[in-house]
């Protein structure tokens, strides 16, 4: 659930009812009745967590409060602690006015659709009731985030002595634990945007706004910089020279040591990953498997193929050996470990990933028909694919939420990419009589 904090579905009554519904689900499962709750730094996080806790207690579940913690940190403690479930109060990379509720079960994974439906059925019962929401103030269990930091540090094969790292915490959940983790491993940390005030989360900072991180890396001569989003499940990087390192480049540099050790033969990414990643991986004999957009689909494919690495261009990277979800801190640690082990900087480690020109054209439409029925568009798509061969991609799909057809074309030359993208877009309009 995500929206504007204070308004439906994140109004106080509904948030309280979520706690009640979750409590019933927990009791139906049997076993532990404890539920751990965590928040990012939004000012609405306190009252929302207290209302969820109040709803849980009203139905005889036992809430515990992790306080400020990244979403992947909450997933880790939900899995390793004595908890039936975890509740994360966060809206990730959204502005502070928004918030959200994410439920994670004891496995550490997001709930499957069928379990969500069960909780929604319970929620519907309580929403039709007349209960008065009661907030439950909780003391933060300081040991929970310390255990998470210890877990991350335990995945490191060597320290970070001698490294200087700029950390942009997005004024969010990584503001404390990020610098604490890297300092624990011996790095010198320069902090920016690590002073949350409840309203400045993601505000012109973090993984969506890398300008200040880049300036800080260049002005301090740091080895690298890392930027998280509000709940720290994503991480993007800046190299010593100021080059932006996106999720595709991270997947590449993290894949090579896994491949060398015999642990990896393919990487899981989405249809939006640039073909430059595919070409770079192929040169090392590593395959790329693409999924629909969304970390949910990446994780499903990773589980199906027992793949250790997958992720998105946005910086949401999953290391299945260590985590059940994308974890920005773990991603940063793996990147910095690779730098230490190879003795190379991010510029050298990602030099082979050449970003191919890409153009996305949105075509406004009033009706949708199966793509295979669009003769002119199909002809233009086949023409583009034949010209590019293995050096380009064409992706055409209808938006699920807007009256749009989306045309994405990648290739080695921008001029040809633009030509084919606009030709396909025009053909779609012609086919649909727009």
Image (cartoon, rainbow, N blue to C red):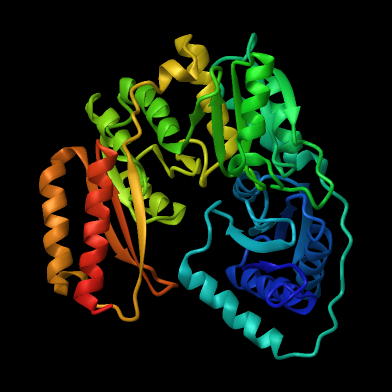
Answer left or right for 15 relative to 120.
right
In the rendered image, residue 290, in percent from the top left (x then y), is placed at 30, 48
Q: Residue at x 45, y 40 (%)?
A: 320
Answer left or right for 179 relative to 312.
right
Examine the rendering and report whether any part of residue 374 can be seen: yes
In the rendered image, residue 15, in percent from the top left (x then y), is placed at 74, 72
Answer left or right for 42 relative to 276.
right
Quadrant containing the N terminus is: bottom right
Q: Residue at x 38, y 29 (%)?
A: 252
Quadrant in the picture for residue 364: bottom left
How many numbered badges does the structure rendering display?
0
In the rendered image, residue 176, in percent from the top left (x then y), is placed at 76, 35
In the rendered image, residue 288, in percent from the top left (x then y), is placed at 28, 40
Quadrant containing the C terminus is: bottom left
Q: Nearer the viewer, residue 255 or 212?
A: 212
Q: Nearer the viewer, residue 58 or 96?
A: 96
Q: Nearer the viewer, residue 218 or 424?
A: 424
Q: Residue at x 74, y 67 (%)?
A: 5
Answer left or right for 353 relative to 380.
right
Examine the rendering and report whether any part of residue 187 can be seen: no
**Vertical side of 391 occupied by 17: above or below:** below
Q: Nearer the viewer, residue 406 or 173?
A: 406
**Vertical side of 10 occupied by 407: above or below:** above
Quadrant in the picture for residue 135: bottom right
């Amino acid at each position: 659930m995500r929206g504007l904090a204070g308004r439906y579905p994140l109004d106080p009554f509904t948030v309280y009812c979520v706690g009640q519904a979750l409590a019933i689900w927990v009791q139906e499962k049997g076993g532990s009745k404890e539920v751990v709750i965590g928040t990012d730094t939004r000012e609405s996080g306190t009252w929302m967590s207290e209302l969820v806790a109040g709803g849980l207690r009203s139905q005889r579940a036992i809430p515990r409060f992790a306080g400020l913690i990244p979403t992947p940190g909450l997933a880790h403690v939900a899995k390793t602690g004595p908890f039936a479930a975890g509740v994360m109060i966060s809206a990730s990379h959204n502005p502070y006015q928004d918030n959200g509720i994410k439920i994670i079960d004891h496995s550490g994974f997001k709930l499957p659709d069928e379990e969500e439906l069960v909780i929604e059925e319970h929620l519907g019962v309580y929403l039709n009731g007349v209960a008065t929401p009661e907030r439950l103030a909780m003391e933060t269990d300081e040991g929970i985030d310390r255990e998470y930091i210890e877990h991350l540090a335990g995945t490191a094969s060597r320290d970070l002595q001698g490294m200087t790292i700029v950390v942009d915490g997005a004024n969010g959940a990584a503001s404390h634990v990020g610098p604490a983790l890297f300092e624990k491993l011996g790095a010198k940390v320069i902090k920016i945007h690590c002073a949350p005030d409840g309203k400045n989360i993601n505000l012109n900072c973090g993984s969506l706004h890398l300008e200040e991180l880049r300036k800080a890396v260049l002005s301090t001569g740091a080895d690298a910089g890392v930027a998280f989003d509000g709940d720290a499940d994503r991480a993007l990087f800046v190299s010593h020279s100021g080059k932006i390192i996106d999720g595709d480049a991270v997947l590449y540099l993290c894949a090579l040591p896994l491949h060398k050790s015999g642990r990896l033969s393919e990487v899981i990414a989405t249809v939006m990953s640039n073909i430059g990643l595919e070409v770079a991986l192929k040169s090392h004999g590593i395959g790329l498997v693409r999924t629909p957009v969304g970390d949910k689909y990446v994780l499903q494919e990773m589980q199906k193929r027992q793949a250790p690495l997958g992720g998105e261009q946005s910086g949401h990277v999953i290391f299945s050996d260590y985590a059940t979800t994308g974890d920005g801190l773990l991603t940063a640690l793996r990147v910095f470990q690779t730098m230490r082990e190879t003795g190379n900087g991010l510029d050298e480690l990602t030099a082979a990933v050449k970003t191919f020109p890409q153009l996305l054209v949105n075509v406004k439409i009033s009706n949708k028909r199966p793509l295979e029925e669009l003769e002119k568009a199909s002809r233009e798509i086949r023409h583009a694919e034949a010209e590019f061969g293995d050096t380009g991609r064409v992706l055409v799909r209808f938006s699920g939420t807007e009256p749009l057809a989306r045309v994405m074309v990648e290739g080695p030359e921008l001029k040809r990419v633009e030509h084919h993208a606009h030709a396909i877009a025009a053909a779609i309009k012609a086919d649909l009589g727009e």
